[in-house]
Amino acid sequence: MRTSIDKRIQKALNAEYKEASTPITEATIKQLKAYTAGELDKFTLPLLLVGTDFQKSVWHALLEIPYGETRSYLELSIQLGDKNAIRAVASANGANAISIIVPCHRIIGKNGNLIGYAGGLLAKKRLLELENPQKCTPQLKLF
């Protein structure tokens, strides 16, 4: 989905990607390193979320999930006001362009299973273990 996400963002912003070091990219790298070292539990980067109003509502809800905690697609759908929006929530979750920073890895199946992560389920498991190693559920231990 990376290519379609990149095209969506470029079109919406009428912009092209340019590889360069900027204060924002440097801050992002620094915060990602601190996060993966277990020294940061909340990113403080300025975000410009590019998507539909519904997608943005899902991504903002993801930002509210505390470090070390998870929610199911159903719980997120209910939080957003429509328990029947599970597929739409999952689709918006998959369209998240800045995973880890907008923590879509914190969304799991209602039975606790790891499902749906663009970076792969092993990466999702490792991120969840990084955030809360004591809360390694039986489902996480399967990987």
Image (cartoon, helix red, strand yellow):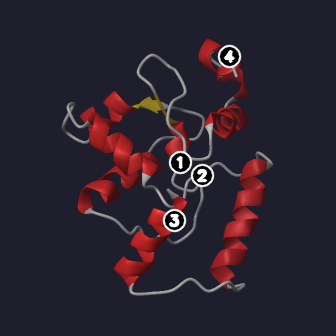
SS for dot 1: loop
Residue at screen point 72% across, 84% down: 21
Q: How far apart, in angstroms, are the residues tagged by discs 2 and 3?
A: 18 Å
Label 1 belongs to which residue?
A: 103
| Badge 1 or badge 4: first in the primary sequence | 1
Q: Quadrant of residue 75?
A: top left
The kind of residue tagged 3 is: Thr
Label 2 belongs to which residue?
A: 100
SS for dot 4: loop
Label 4 belongs to which residue?
A: 142
Which of these two is toward me, 53 or 88?
A: 88
Category of crowding for the residue at label 2, using alpha-carbon neighbours closer than 10 angstroms: few (below 14), some (14–19), many (at least 20): some
| Badge 2 or badge 4: first in the primary sequence | 2
The kind of residue tagged 4 is: Leu
Is residue 89 something that shows in the picture? yes
115 above or below 88?
Answer: above
Q: How far apart, in angstroms, are the residues tagged by discs 1 and 4?
A: 22 Å
Disc sitting over residue 3 in the figure: 3
